[in-house]
Image (cartoon, rainbow, N blue to C red):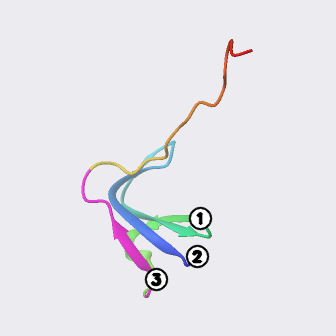
Amino acid sequence: MSAFAITAKRIFDGTQMHADHAIVIEHGRIADLLPRGQLGSGLRVEQVQDGVLAPGFVDVQVNGGG
């Protein structure tokens, strides 16, 4: 799988909001979070048009299941 970037006007990293940044994906994992202007040439870029790009926080703790 080749590396690519996802850009958004706003990216939330779980702690703070980043304006006009991109995340770089390599081998199916987030490799970097950097300002959009620092993306290398030749990297495939996908853009999020509206909204906020944020991690999908999932609570995997199960209470009372057993």
Q: Which mark is residue 1?
A: 2
Q: Nearer the viewer, mark 2 or mark 3?
A: 2
Q: Mark 1 sits on what residue?
A: 28
Q: In which quarter of the image is residue 35?
A: bottom left
Between residue 35 and residue 27, name the one nearer to us: 27
* Percent x, y of residue 32: 55, 65
Between residue 7 and residue 2, name the one nearer to us: 2
Q: Distance between the residues labelled 1 and 2?
A: 7 Å
Spot the residue most to the front. Answer: 66
Residue, x 52% and y 38% (percent of image)?
57
- Confirm or deny contact between disc 2 and disc 3 (CB under 8 A): no
Residue, x 45% and y 81% (percent of image)?
43
* Percent x, y of residue 59: 59, 30
Q: Which of marks 1 and 2 is nearer the N terminus?
A: 2
- Confirm or deny contact between disc 1 and disc 2 (CB under 8 A): yes
Between residue 57 and residue 18, name the one nearer to us: 57
Q: Please, what is the three-letter code of the amino acid marked with disc 3?
A: Gly
Q: Please, what is the three-letter code of the amino acid marked with disc 2?
A: Met
Check if residue 43 falls in the magenta segment: yes
- Look at the picture and state if 20 lies above or below 36: above
Read off the magenta span.
Answer: 42-50
Q: How far apart are marks 3 and 1 (CA)?
A: 18 Å
Side of 53 relative to 55 (left or right): left
